[in-house]
């Protein structure tokens, strides 16, 4: 049986639709043999996910997806094989929770100015004890009939330059990478083509990422086509980075992104899982 790695997915600990245990069960049903839970800026779901993975016979990799800034751009850095008890990382996730709450309050105020009240109470109820993300606001806007899809919510209200966008003071990319590495993990640049950078900007980013200690880049995601995978593989070889594969799964409702439904990593690329110690 071939090994099937999925090293990027989300649970209800951040903005996923499934609990950590249910997420692991779905991954098992999809034939995933090695799974990393990488919730946004939190490690709260890791213990539950690991218990379920151990019971299912799935190799579990502790992960996180950290929000960060570089050159005034918001970037996501996935940490794989982290130690969630590493004090600076634990303190960072606590602070990031407060940062997200403050952002949520500002987004809600902006929506009120657009005559859309009640957002803050609604997203707090949706998130419960989990991180509040913009996806919660997108779901709120969808439930209230202001948009017809999550994507429209971002396009009309939540994306950069839109009426309810709030610039957030994330940690510098180099700091986020440092938290990951010093916790024993491997730093991976998540979905690099999503940032809509020009080729020259992407080269600058990858160079800065490598210089800061970054070790891998996502080459295969749930949304990349064959040309995009080849493009990212070329970049990985050029900058001496390992390659990662992850669906970025959030919900079963998205039929286009499924756990474990990933193209193979190009054979000339060093797999990021070769760098993991556990």
Image: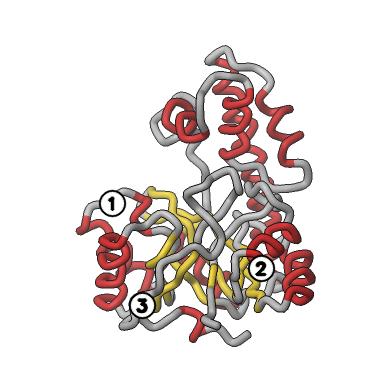
Question: Please, what secondary structure does the residue beneath circle 1 have?
Answer: loop
Q: Of circles 3 and 2, which is in front?
A: 2
Residue 15 x %, y %: 63, 47
Quadrant in the picture for residue 11? bottom right
Instruction: Indicate the colouring scheme.
Output: secondary structure
Q: Secondary structure at mark 3?
A: loop
User: How many C-alpha atoms fall within 10 Å of the one at disc 3: few (<14), some, or many (≥20)?
Assistant: many
Q: Decide if residue 133 is on the left or right side of residue 94.
A: left
> Residue at 55% of width from left, 15% of height from top?
113
Q: Which image quarter is the N terminus in?
A: bottom right
Residue 45: x and y, percent? 73, 60
Q: Is residue 128 left or right of residue 131?
A: right
Q: CA distance from mark 2 to mark 1?
A: 35 Å
Q: What is the secondary structure assignment of the residue under circle 2?
A: helix
Viewer-nearest of labels 2 and 1? 2
Q: CA distance from mark 3 to mark 2?
A: 29 Å
Mark 3 or 2, nearer chain start: 2
Q: Are marks 2 and 1 in contact (CB under 8 Å)?
A: no
Q: Quadrant of residue 23?
A: bottom right
In the figure, 128 relative to 214: above or below? above
Q: Position of residue 235 (x, y in %)?
A: 27, 70
Q: How many C-alpha atoms fall within 10 Å of the one at disc 1: few (<14), some, or many (≥20)?
A: some
Q: Is residue 242 above or below residue 42?
A: below
Give the residue displayed 60% in from the left and 54% down from the top.
40
Residue 19: x and y, percent?
73, 54
Residues tagged 1 and 3 counted as in contact (Cβ below 8 A) = no
Q: Which residue is mark 3?
A: 241
Residue position marked by numbered label 2 in the rendering: 28
Q: Dot 1 corresponds to which residue?
A: 197
Q: Is residue 225 above or below residue 6?
A: above
Which residue is at 64% across, 60% downward? Answer: 92
The answer to which of marks 1 and 3 sits earlier in the sequence is 1
């Amino acid at each position: 049986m071939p090994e099937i790695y999925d090293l990027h997915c989300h649970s209800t600990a951040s903005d996923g639709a499934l609990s950590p245990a249910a997420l692991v069960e779905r991954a098992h049903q999809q034939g995933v043999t090695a799974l990393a839970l990488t919730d946004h800026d939190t490690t709260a779901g890791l213990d539950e996910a690991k218990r379920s993975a151990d019971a299912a016979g799935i190799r579990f990799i502790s992960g996180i997806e950290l929000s960060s800034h570089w050159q005034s751009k918001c970037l996501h850095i996935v940490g794989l094989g982290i130690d969630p008890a590493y004090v600076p990382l634990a303190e960072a996730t606590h602070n990031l929770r407060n940062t997200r709450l403050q952002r949520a309050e500002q987004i809600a105020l902006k929506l009120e100015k657009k005559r859309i009240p009640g957002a803050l109470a609604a997203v707090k109820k949706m998130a419960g004890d989990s991180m509040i993300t913009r996806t919660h606001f997108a779901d709120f806007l969808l439930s209230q009939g202001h948009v017809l899809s999550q994507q429209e919510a971002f396009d009309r209200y939540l994306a950069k330059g839109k009426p309810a966008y709030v610039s957030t003071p994330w940690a510098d990319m180099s700091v986020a990478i440092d938290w990951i590495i010093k916790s024993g993990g491997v730093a991976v640049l998540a979905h690099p083509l999503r940032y809509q950078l020009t080729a020259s900007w992407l080269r600058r980013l990858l160079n800065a990422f490598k210089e800061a200690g970054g070790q891998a880049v996502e080459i295969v995601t749930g949304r990349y086509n064959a040309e995009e995978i080849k493009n990212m593989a070329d970049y990985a070889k050029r900058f001496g980075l390992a390659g990662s594969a992850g669906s970025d799964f959030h919900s079963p409702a998205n039929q286009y992104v499924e756990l474990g439904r990933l193209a193979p990593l190009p054979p000339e690329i060093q797999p990021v899982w070769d760098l993991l110690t556990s």
